[in-house]
Image (cartoon, rainbow, N blue to C red):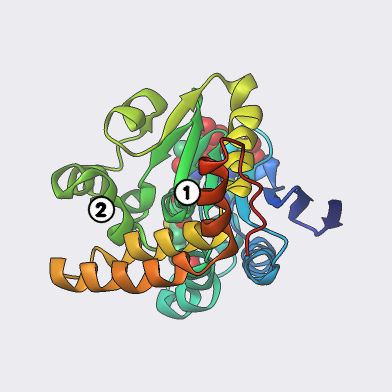
Amino acid sequence: MTSATTFETISISSIDGVCTITMQRPDVLNAFDNTLTTELAKALKDASRNEEVRVVIITGNGRAFSSGQDLADLKAKYVPGYEPHLSGDLKKRYDPIVRTIHNMEKPVIASVNGVAAGAGCSLALACDMRIASEHASFIEVFINVGLIPDSGSTWTLPRLIGFGRAMELCCTGRPVKAEEALAIGLVNQVVPVEELEDATQKLATRLASLPAKAISLTKRLLNQSFENDFTEQLNQEAFAQETAGRTDDHFEGVVAFIEKRKPNFTHK
Ligand code: T3D
């Protein structure tokens, strides 16, 4: 099945269970204005609810993934005497995006085509996996404008690369290029720029072909593992395995192995 929907600041395409959301503000390096955050939040909610979608890809058009909050959008407000109240903005515009990715019961891949800065970096980190082009870089740029890393970065970054590295990157705003990102576990894979789309599709298609219920339970368990002690995690695994064991796909996987044929998973 192929379908396409046009928004103002994103484009969406869906094929064979893979939904690709592309940010479309290349002139400002896909900076987040109100329209982009609203449309991205809606597209992610839709993808999360759509049973035909089994994997989501987020990427950017042009030379950037996203440069974070659109600073030009703030120009009219930032005059002497203005007091920003950013918590409301985060809760309304940014948190729904990263929360939806975190809670979505399907894998979300960031296909990082270029620079990912500020909330753009947080968006990439909120995804479950990252494939980066060799031109990609990650910048916790918030410190340059006197802010803390938001949109989940203070949660995701130390979990991915450890406290010391996270502290350095957040407090210096030092850009991390693709090669270093791979070495420190910030990305899963780095590929030449012209191969990024194919490499991302290949991973997404593979994920979309595997038992969807087992993948969604695995995502939930891995996320919960950061909060649970070992005993609680074993309990959660037993509970999830009981559910996975009752799926048609589990039965099919075992029978296909015994019959020495490829399994035909139906995601049921
Ligand atoms: O307000 C709230 O809700 C709080 C939430 C905050 C979340 C945040 O994301 S705070 C962080 C905001 N983002 C930034 O501070 C990043 C600003 N951009 C940069 O530092 C650099 O552009 C990059 C390091 C990302 C890339 O550098 P470079 O040299 O490759 O590109 P450039 O020349 O700086 O940018 C190209 C164009 O994009 C340029 O426009 P021009 O001159 O060609 O007309 C530039 O102004 C524009 N651009 C880049 N980033 C932004 C942007 N325009 C608006 N907002 C941006 N964030």
- Helix, strand or loop at mark 1: helix
Label 2 residue near ligand 1, CB within 8 Å: no
- The residue located at (84%, 51%) in the rendering is 1
User: Could you say which quadrant of the image residue 147 lies in?
Assistant: bottom left
Q: Residues within 10 Å of mark 2 (few under 14, many from 20)?
A: few
Q: Earlier in the sequence, mark 2 or mark 1?
A: 1
Residue 146 visible in rendering: no
The percent position of residue 19, horizontal first and vertical second, equals: 70, 52
The percent position of residue 30, horizontal first and vertical second, equals: 62, 47
Tell me, for residue 159, which label it has, or none: 2
Q: Residues within 10 Å of mark 1 (few under 14, many from 20)?
A: many
Question: Disc 2 residue type?
Answer: Arg
Nearer the observer: mark 2 or 1; the answer is: 2
Is 231 situated above or below 187? below
Residue 19 visible in rendering: yes
Tell me, for residue 124, which label it has, or none: 1
The percent position of residue 230, horizontal first and vertical second, equals: 14, 66
Is 169 situated above or below 232? above
